[in-house]
Amino acid sequence: MKENWYDKFNRKSEVADSKNKRKEFNKERDKFFEAKRKKTLEKHQDPSFSQKKVSCKIDGIITETEHLFSASSLPKDSVEILNNFDSVIQNVRPLNSRQILKLPKDIRVLSHQLTDERSVRRVGYMNAAEELSAYVRYFSWWNLVRFTRIFSNLPENAFSLKDGDACIDIGSGPLTVVTALWLSRPELRNKKLTFYCMDLSQSALSLGENIYLSVAAKTPPKDKNADAHWNIIKVKGGAGTFIKRKAAFISCANMFNEIRENSESRPDELAQAQVKTLLSYADENTSFFIAEPGMPVAAHFVSLMRGKLLENNFHIISPCPHEKDCAMSGLHARFGGSAKWCNLSFTTEDAPQKLLKLSKDAGIPKERAVVTFIFAKRENFVKKEIVRDENSISKSPDGKTILPLRIASDPIWLPENRQGFYACSRHGLVVVVNMTHKKLISGDKIKVSMLKSIDTLPKDKKSGAVEINV
């Protein structure tokens, strides 16, 4: 049947359909949380709940604190690059004044395409000039801030790379992980490494290579005899594309969220398949860096990947303080499930000021940077606090049990005006009650010398987690 000229005005766009679906989802979600809120209020109004006595006695003493996202770990030359990353890009891929004025809008549009309008996003969006410019000038910049914080705070021997080693960055895009690694680990700049950078977008790879080479030129190796930069080999393709060499380091950042969305497999089956693919690239001492956006579904998938890597005799170097079952798997968290999800964050007050301004201009101001990640290593990595069985639990010199914990939330307020934090432990989820008013922040790893057996401690009514007064 011939279409009338006015019919096109009556058709709903795919974007409109997407927005309607999103509204329906939000309505169901709000209904769920309203019912949950009422149930919580009823519980707190229960006399038996409000009259329960709260213990103020100390259960353990914090003996050590390590920050996960400390900015002070970054080299000074790298901080300079991060603060002026927009200038690096402008020198590599300049925009005219009109394009710069339009940039905040392009960033906002791309942000919607990457979040609530994924269904209408084109597969090759990274090949389009506007999208790629917006991506590297905003999203890559924020990812550099995140990844450099992570890499610079990993243990000294986390990377066991040597001259001649190959590395693979899958879903490399504009080489954000490679650039972040160069900036955050200056000792690796002296190494003769080859990076196979794999992505479906040749445009993103080419731009990323130019950005990396520009950054490397501004932050040269200390060893005058070292190569000026790592060898970059661009590979157009996705996970599973053949690489002739086995890799000593493999990274995948913000890749599995797109694979997961386009897969009909169950999450655990998909995780198994993806780990199998990654292992096909690995040498005998490979380390893996897997990072995803700080969202419940992404956290759950990373948790599944963690489990599969443990099954293949990998150690989790960061952020997990143990190698037992994941205490924050995020199962059903998207729909309000009770399982907490692992999303570690840091405040942005010391992030690049120009990036913060760009975020504000784009209408997406950012007070916290969030990420879900694991760094795993197959080599015999010596880490005393890693626990796979109860016989290997570490003790203090006076015989007390040392319990490593990872702070995994912002402060929460508990009855009797107490401040607490959710934390991950070998005993599962715990609530660290900050009785001594220590300065604790999300991502901190603390070691607690236990004064009491954890089996004797009370549990938080809301989460069921053991409460530890420190």
Image (spheres, rainbow, N blue to C red):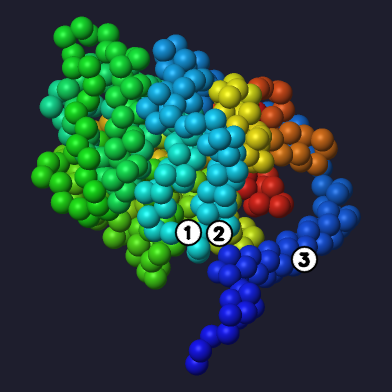
* Residue 184, quarter of the rendered image: top left
Is 215 left or right of 39, judged from the image as shown?
A: left
Indicate the amino acid at tag 2: Glu
Is 129 left or right of 455, judged from the image as shown?
A: left
Task: For mark 2, give the secondary structure.
Answer: loop
Numbered label attached to residue 35: 3
Residue at the extreme front of the image, as rendered: 5
Numbered label attached to residue 121: 1
Task: For mark 1, give the secondary structure.
Answer: loop
Numbered label attached to residue 117: 2
**Residue located 55% across and 42% down the image:** 107
Q: Are marks 3 and 2 in contact (CB under 8 Å)?
A: no
Mark 1–mark 3 distance (CA, rounded to whole Å): 34 Å
Numbered label attached to residue 365: none
Task: For mark 3, give the secondary structure.
Answer: helix
Q: Is residue 82 above or below residue 7?
A: above
